[in-house]
Amino acid sequence: MLRRWCLVGFVFSQLACAGAEPNPASTEHKFSQGMLPVTTSSPQARRSFERAMRRFEDYRLNDTLQDLREAVKADPKFAQAYILIAKISKDPSEQAAARRRAEKLAAAVSPGEALLIRWLADAQKDNYLPAIAAMNDVLEMYPDDARLAFLAGDWLDLQGRYEQSKVVLEHALSLQPNYPAALNDLGYTYAYDSDFPKAFAAMDRYVALQPDQPNPHDSYGEILRMAGKFDAALEQYRASVRMDPNFGSELGVADTLALMGKEQDARDEYARAIVFAGSQTDKIQFELQSALTWIREGDRKQAEKALLEVAKHAHAAELCTLEAEAHRILAMYEPDPKHALRHIVAAQLALQESHDMSASDRDEELARVYRVQAVRAAEFGEMGIANQATNQLESMLGKSRSRVTQLCYASAVGAVFVAQGKFSEAISHLEEDSSDPVSLRLLWRAYGNAGSNEQTQATATRLAALNVPTVEQALVVPQFRASLVSQARQP
């Protein structure tokens, strides 16, 4: 099993070699000159599919879905279009139906398309080892397909596997140096690694290639915000809004204002974003983001009211993961141990509801819930409950190689060790999850108690510089920054 995970890097290193040869056994590869085939009997379906892929590369996801729906309407046996609907749709029922249809049709398509379907379908079913294996195989089969490489890099970014994503996206750009979509994702990958000079350079190229498209400005805004350049980020987001008010960049404006401490202005922008939301999922997600502004303001009553409203709306829409997320956030924010653990139970119950939902979405949200349970129980001194939650995560990890579950387990174990005063043991676990504010704060504490002064300072610097519009950042970073300022003022 470890060999297969190591193989990801091996295949990507092979792809990056200029002399990589196509798979001689693939007649489809020869016919399509190195591109993954598109099996459809309908010229109209093929045209709709190609338009969908161009729009996907421009991050116009609602338009992409509409084109893919038109493609399968023109050709009900269009397997590749179905699996991409499953990948992109935010409607759990549509996602599940499209995935099942793609898998049913997989036997009638080319070997490469069958691998693509297996990769994306197994990932949604929380079968990450066979998903990675299928991804490796299709990339090896078509090493000269820049779009396929972009699709892999984009997926790896979403999995939090940034080093692997970087290699495959750089390979896509070696095939097509002015490939806007690959530049976009590569810029994010550099930013996630805090390499902002390279991220900005990628974004400059991206904007220059598509100056009249909204997404380059939206992406540049997000990366500038990550770097703490809020005013410049707002300029980019607002440029995107001017180009296309329906694109969705109001959300970026709202998130940036929230991080700047302008919470009422942020709520006004979230309200505008909700008006233009492309789906019910987006609408409730924006409501959730708006609810976090009350946490940033320290208004516990309004925060609880807003989050309970989100949970209610998500329940009515049968969006169980968002309902669970709202309760998970309440569990993180609630100071009373009993009330916090009640929200944990509510989140777990929401995930047990028998609605359409991919196994990966359900399991990864459940892993986040168990992580919060372990961290809060350890904080409250309820070590039995904390250990039970870490055991649940360990059991989940034995069945899945989800990156989310791996990080949740590492964070939970680290939190338990910190609560037990076992700081040296905690460090190796918390270092695995060193992008999360809660884990970073625990890691900072563990380093300090272990006497690692240099690492303590480096961790403090990294934690204070986190600018992401998440509940973890809202709960940890502003308070941590204030404590650093207070310490600096002490004689």
Image: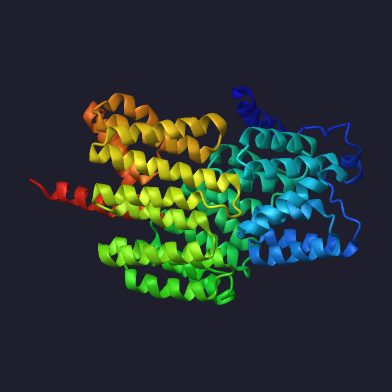
Quarter containing the N terminus: top right
Q: Residue at x 33, y 40 (%)?
A: 375
Position in image of residue 204 (x %, y %): 56, 58
- In the displayed structure, would residue 450 be above or below residue 461? above
Q: Is residue 349 left or right of residue 418?
A: right
Q: How is the image coloured?
A: rainbow
Q: Residue at x 67, y 37 (%)?
A: 131
- In the displayed structure, would residue 235 be above or below residue 7? below
The one of 49 and 305 positioned closer to us in this rendering: 305
> Does residue 232 appear in the picture of this structure?
no
Q: Is residue 438 left or right of residue 3?
A: left
**Total marks in image:** 0
Q: Residue at x 77, y 63 (%)?
A: 51
Q: Is residue 11 left or right of residue 270?
A: right
> Does residue 275 appear in the picture of this structure?
yes
Position in image of residue 193 (x %, y %): 47, 43
The one of 471 and 254 positioned closer to us in this rendering: 471
Quarter containing the C terminus: top left
Q: Residue at x 26, y 65 (%)?
A: 301
Position in image of residue 86 (x %, y %): 68, 54
User: For the view shown, which residue lies furthest in the left direction?
Assistant: 491
The one of 91 and 468 positioned closer to us in this rendering: 91
- In the displayed structure, would residue 47 be above or below residue 477? below
Position in image of residue 285 (x %, y %): 48, 62
